[in-house]
Image (tube, grey):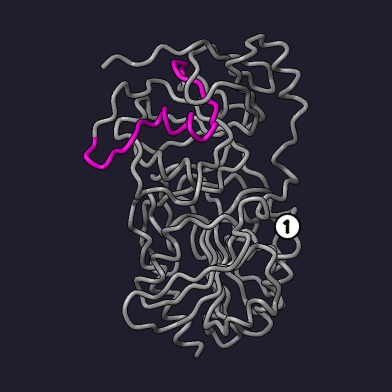
Amino acid sequence: MPAPTNGSAVLVLEDGRTFHGEAYGAEGETFGEAVFNTGMTGYQETLTDPSYHRQVVVMTAPHVGNTGINDEDAESRRIWVAGYVVRDPARVPSSWRSRRSLDDELRAQGVVGISGIDTRALTRHLRERGAMRVGISSTGTDPAALLERVRGQAEMAGAELAGEVSTPETYVVAAVGEKRLTVAALDLGIKSMTPHRLAERGVEVHVLPATASVEDVLAVAPDGLFYSNGPGDPAATVGQVELLQELLARDTAYFGICFGNQLFGRALGFGTYKLKYGHRGINQPVMDRTTGKVEVTAHNHGFAVDAPLDRPADTAYGVATVSHVCLNDDVVEGLELRDPGGRLKGFSVQYHPEAAAGPHDAAYLFDRFVQLMEASR
């Protein structure tokens, strides 16, 4: 079956670099922050990850869409990426699980994309110049006019976005088998696999809106508090940091991932900063300094915690140390909080142990959280 013939499209970065290609997905115009993902698989999980809200994702894998779209692997209720960039889209999806093509799904959800461009050159440009604002248009292909609109868009730095992707109301993910524990999970852009991983371990998960108060959390009578991944600048987030500080003062067991790691760092008194082009993919090597084990991990973040790698730091809630570090660039990939006697009170990681899509090296962190909650009881 031949691929449909698409019209022309143009991609313009805020520094003026321009790429011409073919329209892919919905026709129209879109803007966001240009970032690249190095995963060779897992595009459906990437598209539906709320952490990509307001970002235009460039896929470094040249051939995308070959397994189509199924009804099982979505990580949230919709596609969140602001735009999608691929080099060579599959003409025909081939998988027994596929229900429709990636192109059809992008069209159905109104996601504007571009194909047929040199994504290797675009990725190298973003690595050298850094993530930046971008526009894609298949309706107005004058680069100069599009560049002017790109430069009028808001930047990611300073953006508070968790409230735009969070659940509007609380819902419960029941424990699988016998219920052992209860967790209050703050939805800052949570992926559906995360509460599922906890439920597999006998944890009943109450997923709360990003605007939840201390009273909302305590009403759940949780054994532990969880902060999810999510989009935006952690330095622009205030309410969730104050909530976490109040619950840490109550000795609530804590586990955070991705955005939850950054907010944990801010709650402990550390700063955060924007990475040049971030970590996005499923092949990032990280060392767990508590065990010496190296894991290959899934990442999606453009901000990081500024904490000392060489020494513990005293905080208002205990002693904090960097527990995980990226072996590519020494970025802080995890934090641990202990009381003066050495008892673990909370921890976080910058990556995605729920492994959607893979790898599964970091699944032990959910077991560590269960052990923490049981010990805190």
Q: Is residue 258 above or below residue 373?
A: above
Q: Residue at x 47, y 16 (%)?
A: 117
In the image, the segment drawn in magenta is 95-118
Give the position of the N terminus as an image quadrant. Answer: top left
Residue underneath mark 1: 237
Residue that lies at the very extreme toward the left in this rendered image: 96
Nearest the viewer among 77 and 161 is: 77
Q: Is residue 139 above or below residue 35?
A: above
Q: Residue at x 65, y 78 (%)?
A: 248
Residue 252 visible from this viewpoint: yes
Q: Position of residue 314 (x, y in %)?
A: 68, 75
Q: Residue at x 69, y 74 (%)?
A: 315
Three-letter code for the amino acid on which mark 1 is drawn: Thr
Quarter assignment of residue 14: top right
Residue 143, magenta (yes or no): no
Q: Is residue 201 left or right of residue 230?
A: left
- Crowding near the residue tagged with mark 1, few <14, some 14–19, many ≥20 C-alpha atoms within 10 Å: some
Nearest the viewer among 267 and 231 is: 231
Q: Is residue 252 above or below residue 168?
A: below
Q: Is residue 262 left or right of residue 281?
A: right
